[in-house]
Image (spheres, rainbow, N blue to C red):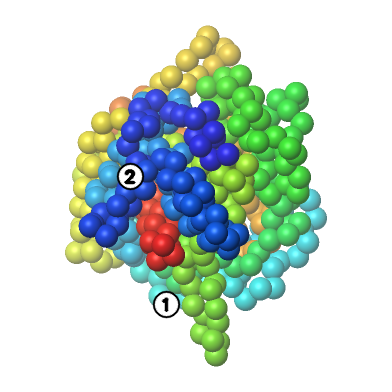
Amino acid sequence: PWSLSVARSRPLGWSPGRPPFPGPKGPGRPRRREGQHELGVQRAGAGQGAAAAVQLLVTLSFLPRVVEAQVTGVLDDCLCDIDSIDNFNTFKIYPKIKKLQERDYFRYYKVNLKRPCPFWAEDGHCSIKDCHVEPCPESKIPVGIKAGSSNKYLKVANNTKELEDCEQASKLGAINSTLSNQSKEAFIDWARYDDSQDHFCELDDERSPAAQYVDLLLNPERYTGYKGSSAWRVWNSIYEENCFKPRSVYRPLNPLAPSRGEDNGESFYTWLEGLCLEKRVFYKLISGLHASINLHLCANYLLKETWGKPSWGPNMKEFKRRFDPVETKGEGPRRLKNLYFLYLIELRALSKVAPYFERSIVDLYTGNVEEDADTKTLLLNIFQDTKSFPMHFDEKSMFAGDKKGAKSLKEEFRLHFKNISRIMDCVGCDKCRLWGKLQTQGLGTALKILFSEKEIQKLPENSPSKGFQLTRQEIVALLNAFGRLSTSIRELQNFKVLLQHSRCHCI
C-alpha cells in the first residue's frame, strides 16, 4: 500500500531513481535493492520464523522511507520544494529564531486564560498537573514591558518627557471635557471597531485584570494528556464549521473524528481540488497548524516519571500514530505537507513586514538599552534571511477576481479565521489554550500583514502609522508562532533520523 500511495500522490520533481532517505554506507552495509525482500522471503522457506523475521526487517527498513518518500517534492499551490525549505530552515532560520525567542521582549506574552468559551458551556478546566500554566510574577517582568501601552516598542512611546506631557494633557482633558461618560464609551467602542477591521483574530484585552504575563520559556508546549471529548469538540468545531467544507462532503475533516470510513484518504481529498484557491489555502493553514501542534506533542512527550521527576522526549509510537501513511490511511503525509505550506505563508509575511521594523522609530523596548539594540539587530537579520528565500508564496494570486466578489470572499475568510481564534477560549487545558491562542494569533497577524501591503509601503519613517500598526502582543505572537513552525520542521528531521537509527539497530 505504501508504494501505491506514493505513486498516486507523486509530486512534480519526484525522482523514482533517487532513494528518499539513503541508508548507511560502508563495506558491510550494501544498499537494499528493489525486490530484495521477496528474495529473502523465498530463501527462508526452512521455517515460518525465518520468513517472519525477514518480513519484520523489510517493514522496519521501509519506515523512514515512507515519511521521506511522501513528504517531498513541490508543494501544491506554490512553486517551492520541501528539500529547499528543510535546508533553509535548518541552516538559516532555526538557530536565529530560537535565539530570538529567548530574548526578554519575545519570551513574555500577555494573555487572558480565563475568558469564557463563547460557543458552549465549558466542561471545566483540565485537572492534569501538566496542563497548568504558571503566570509570571510582576517582579520578573522587565520594566519597559509592564510599564506601558500595547505599542510600547515605539521610540516615541518610550520618551519619558513625552509620556509625562501626554499624562498631563489627559488630566487637563478630563477636567475640561463636556462629553458624558456614555459618549466617551461610544467613542472608545468606535475606535476599537475601526482598529479591528484588519484583524484576523479576536485579541485579548491587555488591560483586563484577568490578563497575565506568561514566561513562554518556563511554560513550554508539550504533551499534557489533554484529550477526549473536550479536545475533539474544539477541533471538530474548527474543521466542520469553519473550513469551507462543501455540503456534498459527509466524511468528517477532523482527524480526531471517531470514524473515518473505508476511504483510503487519497480519493477523499479530491474535494479539495474543486475549491477555489482561497478556500484551499484556508484548509491547508488549519491542517498545517494542527500538524505542527501534534509534532510538538510527539517531540516533547512524557516518557516516564521517576520520584516526581518527569522525563520528556520524542515518542516514536505517537509520531507514527499521527503521521504514518498506513495508520492514517494516507493522510499523515498530507498533514505534514500542509505544515510546510503554513511555514511558507508565515515566512512570506515576515519578509513583507520587514520595512515596518527597519524604521529607526521602532525600538523593541524592555528597558535594557543594550539588549534591546541586540534584539532588534537579530530580528532584522532574520528579516534579511526571509527576504533572501527565492521561492516565496505569491499572496497576490488570492482574492484576485472581480473586486466585489474578491472583497466579499476576503471578509468571509477573515471572519472564519477570527471565529477560530475565539474557539481557542474553549480549550480546557490552560497550557494548550496558551499555545493555541498564541499560534492562532501569530497566524492571524501574518494574514493581516499579507493583505496590508499598500499600507506597509506607505509607512512614514519617523512617525507612527495610522494605516498599519502592530501591537506588542501581535509582534510577540507572530515571531513565536513562526518559531514553533521552524521547530516543527526541525523535529520532523529528528524523527526521520530516529526512524533511520531504529532500522539500522534492528538490522
Q: Residue at x 58, y 22 (%)?
A: 273
Give the residue pinned by disc 2. Answer: 86
Comparing 356 with 304, the one in front is: 304
- What is the CA distance from the residue labelled 1 to the residue labelled 2? 40 Å
Does 267 sit left or right of 384 as displayed? right
Does 403 sit left or right of 232 as displayed? left
Q: Residue at x 55, y 59 (%)?
A: 46
What numbered label is drawn on residue 278?
Answer: none
Outermost top residue: 402
* Residue 258, image x, y percentages: 76, 49
Amino acid on which the number 2 mark rests in the picture: Asp
Quadrant where the C terminus sits is bottom left
CA neighbours of label 1 inside 10 A, class few (<14), some (14 to 19), many (20+): few
427 up-or-down from 482: above or below: below
Counting residues from the N terminus, which is met first, the one under dot 1 or under dot 2? 2
Comparing 222 with 99, the one in front is: 222
CA neighbours of label 2 inside 10 A, class few (<14), some (14 to 19), many (20+): some
Tell me the mark number nearer the camera, choosing from 1 and 2. 2
* Residue 135, image x, y percentages: 52, 71
351 up-or-down from 169: above or below: above
Amino acid on which the number 1 mark rests in the picture: Ser
Q: Residue at x 51, y 65 (%)?
A: 315
What numbered label is drawn on residue 139?
Answer: 1
- Can residue 354 be seen here? no
Comparing 146 with 236, the one in front is: 236
Q: Residue at x 76, y 57 (%)?
A: 229
Which structural element holds mark 2?
A: helix
Does 506 sit left or right of 236 as displayed? left
Quadrant where the N terminus sits is top right
* Residue 24, image x, y percentages: 29, 55
Count of numbered labels shown in the rendering? 2
